Image: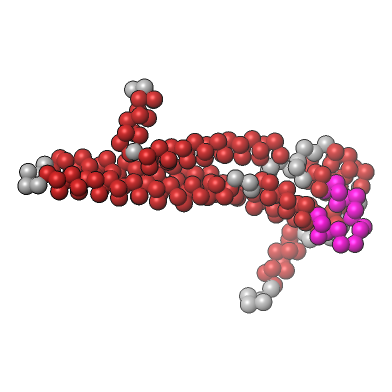
Amino acid sequence: MNPLTALREILALGGPVVAILIVMSVLTLAVTLYKLWQFAACGVGRHRVLSEALAAWDAGDRSAARMRLNQSSSYLAPIVGAAMDASDVPGVDDRLDAEAGLALAGLERGFRLLDTVAQLAPLLGLFGTVLGMINAFQSLQSAGSSVDPSLLAGGIWVALVTTAVGLAVAMPTSMVLSWLESRTARERVFADKALRTVLVPGQAIPATDAASSLAATPEHA
């Protein structure tokens, strides 16, 4: 069957509610593709070169740190560079935190739309089902004593189409949003560690010592 013909049949069955849900699915796809491109262009999750620069800075090798930083394509590289240039300026950490927060806010742009689609699509589908059930029972009432069970059954399954479409839009949208939010959360942690490393170098805590200190902490401390 021609996809355009199938789409027309679905729209004819579901009515304007399904049309709205299809528009929402197109918007979701467009935002998802944009976010994937944005994350790839900004180097989200790819911080190998930047991590090497931070390790060199932490070890006291300033020239090697700046050389590796210039080779990094991460969106955090300019902020880390500014931190290296102003590491001795009092109160610069607040300004750098604000700049990092602004960069991360750019990565989160579009999340609100995806969240709205994930929450609204099932409700729209349910709304369409309720409208369809009302029409089905109105047709049943109009039939009077000559009730045809197939009439009611046909009206019910047509009404349920909107719920199915709403769930089909909401579930992948919710999965994509959760994945994007998890990537952004990791970026936030890395950005905070990067700035703290530059502003307070040479203070790394070995993993074994950190684990021992956590184990020795009282449970209710």
Residue 35: quarter of image: top right
Tell me if I can see residue 191 in this picture: no
Left or right of 175? Residue 12 is left
Measured as percent of width and height from the top left, residue 62 is found at: 92, 47
The verdict on residue 204 being magenta is no
Q: Nearer the viewer, residue 182 or 24?
A: 24
The relative height of residue 49 versus residue 83 in the rendered view (above or below) is: above
Tell me if I can see residue 84 in this picture: yes
Q: Nearer the viewer, residue 82 or 4?
A: 4
The structure residue drawn at horizontal position 70% and vertical position 64%, both measured from the top left corner, is 211
The verdict on residue 87 being magenta is yes
Image quadrant containing the N terminus = top left
Secondary structure predominantly adopted by residues drawn in magenta: helix
Measured as percent of width and height from the top left, residue 111 is found at: 58, 48
Measured as percent of width and height from the top left, residue 89 is found at: 91, 58
The structure residue drawn at horizontal position 73% and vertical position 51%, both measured from the top left corner, is 102
Q: Which residues are magenta?
A: 80-96
Residue 132: quarter of image: top left
